[in-house]
Each structure stands twice: as structure tokens, then as C-alpha cells.
Image (cartoon, rainbow, N blue to C red):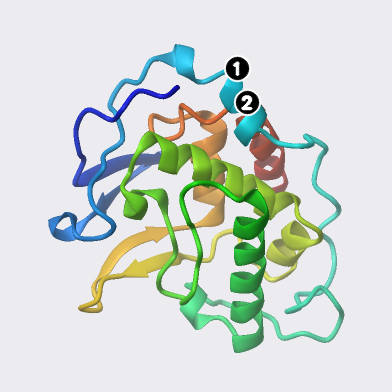
Amino acid sequence: MLATPSKPKAFESVFLSGATLTLVLLSCGLGGCGGKVENPSSSTTSGANSSSHGADSTSGPASTSGTPTASGDSGGASTGSASSTCDLPAAIQQGLLDRWNAAVSVAAEQVDFGWSKCDEFAHPTLKGGTVEAYVDFAAVLLQFFQAGDDFTFLAQNQLFTTQLVYATPSGQIGLVMTFKELATQVASGTSLFEDAPPATRSAIAMYLAEMN
């Protein structure tokens, strides 16, 4: 069983491909500040967790060649130079949210990572920042990459580096992230995702290699 987080973190410093991204939770009002423990014991990362959160399969991602589309079929609109999910064509934006939410439903983790609006991406920091939140998020991310043609959809629509944002009720951007950055964090087992099962991290690393 994972240890109860010992202190909240209102600021998360995340190592991302040589850069540091500071995620700010204003007044700890976004889902509470449950906190991610600073140095959880490595002995809690294997065994039972691997069976409950690990990948069902670690096979490599399917081919991602093809024309950018909203559904995976030919004839869809290209994302062009969309910088964030809110800049995407409506069909692609809705397709992305629908696919993500389907993965959330299948993963059936304790923490709900439902994504209802383009500027409300459900990052685990915004779900309390607990060990459980990060472990559950890693499982959802892997399920998303593995499900059907979801990974091909991301590749064809150039969504690996599209910004996933969370805007506060006042309209300020409180978080900016990309799928590639998230995959990098999980695969490398940073302090945020060090409790994710090795099988999950290894499987996501395979998808990350296809993004480069």
C-alpha cells in the first residue's frame, strides 16, 4: 500500500526535456492540494501496483503514417499549426476529448481524469497531486495510447506537441503540458511518476520512441 502523502505541494517543478515547467495551483483551490510525497519508498512501486495499474500489453504502437484526419479516415481537416487543444478544428478537438474520455472509462481508476472542455485538461496535479493521482494518470495515459487507433489519431493530427492547457475560472492559464512531455515524465520515472509500475513506464517509453 502506498504511504499517505506527508505534505502538500502548491508548486510542482517538473523536468521536461532539459527545461523546467512550474505548475501553479492558485490558493490550492483546484481539487485541493493533497500533495505528492517528496521521497516515497521505492519498495512500494512493484508487486500489487503492477497488476492493478500496469499495461495489459507492451507491444509497440501501430504504424502512424497517413493523412491528418479527425476520425482516422481520409478527408479530415488538418490541425495545421494549432498551438493548443482549443485552437484545433472542432471535429478533431471533439474527437480528442472523446477518445481520452473513453480511455478514462476503460481504465476505471479511482481518480477521475475526465476531460470535458478544451482548456480543462485533467492533469494529476489538479487532482490533488497525490501519489495515487499520478499512478492512476499513468495508467489512463497508457490506456489512451493503446486503445484502438488513438495513437495513430494523435500522430496523423500532429497532437503529440499540441499544448494541453488548464485555465483557471478567471481565465488565467494555470498549467501547460503536451502528450510528449507527459510520456517523457512517465517513461523516465521522474519524482512525479516514480510510483507508476515499471510495466506501465516501459510501455509508455515504447510509444514515446515513436513520437521522436
Residue drawn at x 50%, y 81% as measured from the top left: 87
Q: How many marks?
A: 2
Q: Is residue 56 above or below residue 128?
A: above
Can the viewer see residue 183? Answer: yes
Left or right, residue 96 beside residue 13: right
Instruction: Look at the numbered disc 2 and give the secondary structure of its residue.
Output: helix
Q: Mark 1: few, some, or many residues within 10 Å (few <14, many ≥20)?
A: few
Q: Are marks 1 and 2 in contact (CB under 8 Å)?
A: yes
Residue 101 disc label = none
Q: Nearer the viewer, residue 86 or 39?
A: 39
Q: Position of residue 116 (x, y in %)?
A: 49, 74
- The disc labelled 2 sits on which kind of residue? Ser
Q: Quadrant of the N terminus?
A: top left
Cα separation, mark 1 vs mark 2, equals: 6 Å
Image location (x, y in percent) of residue 115: 50, 68
Q: What is the crowding at mark 2: few (fewer than 14 residues within 10 Å), some, or many (at least 20)?
A: some
132 vs 13, left or right, is right
**Residue identifier under label 2:** 50
**Residue beneath label 1, please?**
47
Using the rendered image of the protein, determine whether residue 79 is visible from the camera's viewpoint.
no
Is label 1 in a helix, a strand or a loop? loop
Q: Residue furthest left?
A: 27
Tell me if residue 156 comes above or below residue 208 in the rendering. Answer: below
Question: In this view of the protein, which residue sits in the foreground, 92 or 81?
Answer: 92
| Kind of residue at disc 1 | Gly
**In the figure, residue 29 lies in which quadrant?**
bottom left
Residue reaching furthest top? 43
Task: Give residue 26's position: percent from left, percent from top.
Answer: 17, 60
Residue at 44 percent of width and 60 percent of height: 122
